[in-house]
C-alpha cells in the first residue's frame, strides 16, 4: 500500500535543505522528473518489482493509488512530502499545477517488462 512520508528538512535563515537518500526505503537505481504537464493523466500502471518514491519538488499534483484493496488520493503539495509506491500500487498522476515538477525515484532501472497496465477491477 502506498504511504506518505515527510522528509527531514533542515531550515535556517539561508533557506531549506531536504534530505532524501536515507529517508527512502530502497537503493536508488533510477530517477526522472515530469513537468510541463497539461490536463493529461500520467502513469496508469503498476510494477512487478519496482518501488517508487514521488516528490513534487515544485508546484503540486495528485497521485491516485489502488493496491487492489484500497484506493487513496495523495496531494503532493510540498517538497518535503514523499509518496512511496509499492510495486502493486496501480497509480496515476493528475491535476498538475502549471509549475509542477514531479521527481520520481525508482528502485530499478527502466525495464518495459516490469510494467503492468491493467488496472484492478475494484
Image (cartoon, grey):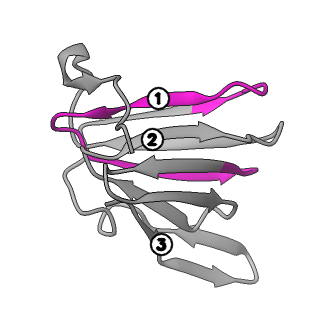
Q: Nearer the viewer, mark 2 or mark 3?
A: 2
Single out the mark in the foreground, 3 or 1. 1
Q: CA distance from mark 3 to mark 1?
A: 26 Å
Considering every residue shown, the one lying at the far right of the view is 98
Looking at this rendering, what residue extends furthest in the top direction?
112
Contact, mark 1 vs mark 2 (Cβ under 8 Å) = yes
Checking the image for residue 7, the label placed there is: 3
Few, some or many C-alpha atoms within 10 Å of disc 3 (few <14, some 14-19, many ≥20)?
some
Foreground residue among 9 and 66: 66
Which residue occupies 66% across, 40% down? 101
In this image, 58 relative to 112: left or right? right
**Counting residues from the N terminus, which is met first, the one under dot 2 or under dot 3?**
3
Q: Secondary structure at mark 3?
A: loop
Q: Residue at 71% across / 73% down in the picture?
A: 15
Query: Where, by quadrant of the figure, is residue 20 drawn?
Result: bottom left
Image quadrant of residue 17? bottom right
Q: Which mark is residue 44?
A: 1
Instruction: Tell me which numbered mark, 1 or 2, is placed earlier along the sequence.
Output: 1
Q: Nearer the viewer, residue 116 or 15?
A: 116
Instruction: Give percent across and percent down for residue 80.
Output: 57, 68
Q: Secondary structure at mark 1?
A: strand
At 64% from the left and 50% from the top, the residue drawn is: 62
Judge by depth and name the residue closer to the eye, 86 or 33.
Answer: 86
Q: Is residue 39 left or right of residue 35?
A: right
Q: Are marks 3 and 1 in contact (CB under 8 Å)?
A: no
User: Spatial distance from mark 1 to mark 2, Cα to Cα?
Assistant: 6 Å
- Badge 2: how crowded within 10 Å, few (<14), some, or many (20+)? many
Marks 2 and 3 close (CB-CB < 8 Å): no
**Disc 2 to disc 3, C-alpha distance:** 21 Å
Residue drawn at x 36%, y 37% is 121
Q: Which residues make up the magenta segment?
A: 34-61
Q: Which mark is residue 91?
A: 2
Amino acid at each position: 500500500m502506498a504511504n506518505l512520508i515527510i522528509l527531514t528538512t533542515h531550515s535556517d535563515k539561508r533557506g531549506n535543505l531536504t534530505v532524501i537518500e536515507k529517508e527512502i526505503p530502497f537503493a536508488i537505481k533510477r530517477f526522472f522528473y515530469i513537468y510541463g504537464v497539461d490536463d493529461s493523466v500520467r502513469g496508469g500502471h503498476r510494477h512487478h518489482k519496482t518501488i517508487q518514491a514521488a516528490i513534487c519538488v515544485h508546484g503540486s499534483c495528485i497521485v491516485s493509488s489502488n493496491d487492489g484493496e484500497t484506493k487513496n488520493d495523495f496531494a503532493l503539495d510540498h517538497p518535503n512530502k514523499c509518496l512511496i509506491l509499492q510495486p502493486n500500487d496501480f497509480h496515476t498522476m493528475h491535476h498538475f499545477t502549471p509549475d509542477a515538477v514531479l521527481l520520481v525515484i525508482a528502485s530499478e532501472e527502466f525495464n518495459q517488462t516490469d510494467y503492468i497496465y491493467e488496472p484492478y477491477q475494484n
